[in-house]
């Protein structure tokens, strides 16, 4: 099972009950949190368990980050373990990044206290 990195914007964030399965019989995962990014290939997904155990605080933190990213349209990155030939991976860490600033043709002009963007 290899460790791969994914990043992109969340297009699906699903939370379900313990024991639910996501995916077909030959390529599925039994997890409580499922994420699909705009960079996933069709049918692919990643997820993790959200159980009452020693890892619960970390996993709850990962879910909180994913929820914030989904709600605000932020870019998310994560490492997931995925078996060769499969499209479903188990997330082991999550991080957020902001998109780089967009250039819209404006000019940054120095103002008295703060920079001011002037659109021309």
Image: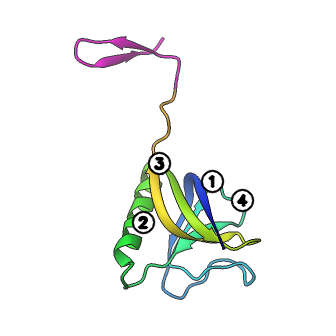
Crowding at dot 1, Cα within 10 Å, few <14 / some 14-19 / many 20+, comes out as few
Residue at 37%, 85% (x, y): give it: 52
Q: Secondary structure at mark 3?
A: loop
Residue 5's image quarter? bottom right
Query: Quarter of the image containing the N terminus?
Result: bottom right
Residue 57's image quarter? bottom left
Give the mark nearest the N terminus, 3 or 2: 2
Which segment did they paint magenta? 103-120
Is residue 113 rendered magenta in the image?
Answer: yes
Between disc 2 and disc 4, the foreground one is 2
Q: Which residue is mark 3?
A: 74
Dots 3 and 2: beta carbons under 8 Å?
A: no
Residue 56's image quarter? bottom left
Q: Which residue is mark 4?
A: 41
82 or 106: nearer the eye? 82
24 or 51: nearer the eye? 51
Give the mark nearest the N terminus, 4 or 3: 4
Residue at 32%, 11% (x, y): give it: 110
Q: Residue furthest left?
A: 113
**In the rendering, which numbered label is found on residue 38?**
1
Dots 2 and 4: beta carbons under 8 Å?
A: no
> Is residue 6 depicted above or below 32 in this figure?
above
Q: Which residue is mark 2?
A: 62
How far, Cα to Cα, is label 4 from label 3? 20 Å
Residue 17 on image: x %, y %: 48, 84
Residue 104 on image: x %, y %: 52, 22
How far, Cα to Cα, is label 2 from label 1? 19 Å
Between disc 2 and disc 1, the foreground one is 2
95 or 102: nearer the eye? 95
Residue at 47%, 48% (x, y): give it: 74
Give the mark nearest the N terminus, 2 or 1: 1
């Amino acid at each position: 099972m290899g460790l791969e990195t994914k990043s992109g914007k969340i297009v699906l964030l699903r939370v379900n009950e313990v024991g639910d399965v996501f995916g077909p019989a030959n390529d599925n995962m039994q997890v409580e949190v499922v994420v699909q990014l705009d960079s996933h290939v069709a049918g692919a997904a990643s997820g993790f368990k959200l159980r009452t155990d020693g890892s619960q605080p970390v996993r709850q933190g990962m879910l909180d980050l994913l929820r914030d990213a989904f709600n605000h349209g932020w870019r998310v990155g994560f490492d997931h373990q995925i078996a060769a030939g499969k499209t479903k991976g188990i997330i082991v860490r999550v991080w957020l990044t902001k998109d780089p600033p967009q250039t819209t043709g404006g000019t940054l002009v120095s103002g008295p206290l703060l920079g001011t963007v002037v659109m021309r």
